[in-house]
Amino acid sequence: MKILMVSAEAVPFAKTGGLADAVSALAITFANMGHDVKIVIPRYYKIDRNKLTPLEGPMGIPVGGGEAWTQVFETSMPDCENLKVYFIDHEQSFGRDGVYGTPAETDFHDNPYRFSILCHGAFQLCRKLGWIPDIIHCHDWSASPALVFLKHIYRYQEFENTAGVLTIHNLGYQGQYSKENFASFGIDWGLYYGAGFEHNGGINLLQAGISSADMITTVSPTYANEIQTPEGGFGMDGLLRVRSDVVRGILNGADLRSWNPKTDKRLPKNYDFKTIKDKAVNKEALQKNMGLEVNPDVPVFGIVTRLADQKGIAELFAPTYGCMYNMCNNLKIQVAVLGSGEAWCENEIRTLESKLPNFKAYIGYDENLSHLIEAGSDFFIMPSRYEPCGLNQIYSLLYGTLPIVRRTGGLADTVENYNEATGEGTGFMFDCLTPGAVYDTVGWATYAYYNKKDHIKKMQKAGMSKTFTWDKSAELYLETYKEAIFRGCHK
Ligand code: ADP
Ligand code: GLC
């Protein structure tokens, strides 16, 4: 199949979260299966133009206010020569720091215009390449307008046999702006209502995508159900229930090229289940690196996360409310945190660090440290309020680091709760997100660490023998693509 991925992020070029991992890993899997797949993303300021090949001539993109003149660059995905990645370069829109915003302006005021360039640009790129895909696969709110453009404009042109698929990686981010921003798209005002943009008197990009896609997927089966309920629907549950016949939940995989403890080049010492004693070398390196007391006998609890409300940061870190202080004070444990995000939380983490000798944190983004925390910790804490899929608990399972998670979304689909009677399971789970529940579950894991060593080992083995490859998910996406073509193009 010919597949075009439209996304704001793709590793290794631009990443703010798991979306970037998922888009590239899925595309690589398709390319290795022999499909003709391409990715298009913006050329952000941080992506070095000198490492890319410019396509000949400028490319005009019809957006609101007239044509935007851009230049397109091309490169191959590292280690996947036949997967081409295209970058749309528009200085005014992307020649600045930040994918969606900066700490000073967390959501750029001109995002509708910036992503209008990406979304109309995807079609212009196809024309320029003389390559019409069977599937335009759009990821999240920022690529959603492309589904509107396909359904209402380009399908009446040479894209008559192209179907549109939307993947919702996170329903909590919808791209909501005031009404006048509709003009950025350069399309008929009739589509303000007609394509489902209108929301509370403004525009909602994701809602328009949900309304216009031929098929809609999200990144785990449980999350596919949750988004159709008032509790998990972020106001979109009604619309998603209307469209429930085209909604599918397909679990993400992990990119085993970079996340395999046996081959991970970032680790001081590689290991697998047979050589799990070597995990201790990584634990020691982690303790040294973070400035924790080097002690093989104390359990280390790792956290790697965006510091966003979604991740349960209030229940962990909020002053007086969060459980971290009491947890570290009362339990014989160590905690290693890597994260960046909300300023209050970064500050609170620094405060905790100054008060607790067994709590250390690195505020920032650090790929190497994220691998070391996965390998060197005994447990991984991920108490998400909601979690579409989640990658870190999957990495934890593969690294023999038992996840402590709330039973929600992809966490519920990937972790099995510890059974004290049999030692079965792959992690520790709780249901209701409260500071007390997080504390108790960490306490439960600590108890097992000190008193049920055989159970811990059994659970590590169970987690490490799970397969989280993308192959199975890719097959399910292909089925979804076929259904999208059937629904969208055979009318
Ligand atoms: P989300 O996409 O909601 O943030 P996921 O678990 O799907 O959650 O993916 C998060 C990805 O981002 C993982 O690959 C994780 O290792 C990475 N990550 C998050 N925060 C950091 C950080 N501060 N430093 C390095 N990697 C991080
Ligand atoms: C989002 C979700 C996360 C998911 C990732 C990749 O960022 O928050 O749960 O794993 O997308 O699909």
Image (spheres, helix red, strand yellow):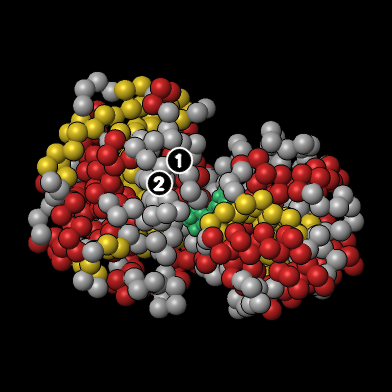
Kind of residue indicated by mark 1? Ala
Q: Nearer the viewer, residue 34 or 108?
A: 108
Quadrant of the drawing holding the N terminus: top left
User: If the image is split into quadrants, where does the C terminus sit?
Assistant: bottom left
Q: Position of residue 132 (x, y in %)?
A: 23, 35
Q: Is residue 280 left or right of residue 209?
A: right
Residue at screen point 81% across, 70% down: 329
In this rendered view, identify the residue nearer to me: 229 or 43: 43
- Position of 75 relative to 197 (above/below): above
Q: Which mark is residue 210?
A: none
Asked if residue 435 is positioned above or below residue 108 in the image, the reply reads: below
Classify mark 2: helix, strand or loop.
loop
Res. 389 in view: no
Question: Is 284 left or right of 402, judged from the image as shown?
Answer: right
Q: Mark 2 = which residue?
A: 99
- Which residue is found at the position 42% from the left and 33% from the top? 47
Asked if residue 5 lies left or right of residue 419, the reply is left
Residue contact between numbered discs 2 and 1, judged by CB atoms under 8 Å:
yes
Where does label 1 land, which residue?
A: 14
From this view, report whether residue 19 is shown above or below residue 173.
above
Residue type, label 2: Val
Q: Residue at x 40, y 72 (%)?
A: 233
Q: CA distance from mark 2 to mark 1?
A: 8 Å
Residue 445 is situated, as x and y percent measured from the top left of the image, at 78, 67
Q: Quadrant of residue 255?
A: top right
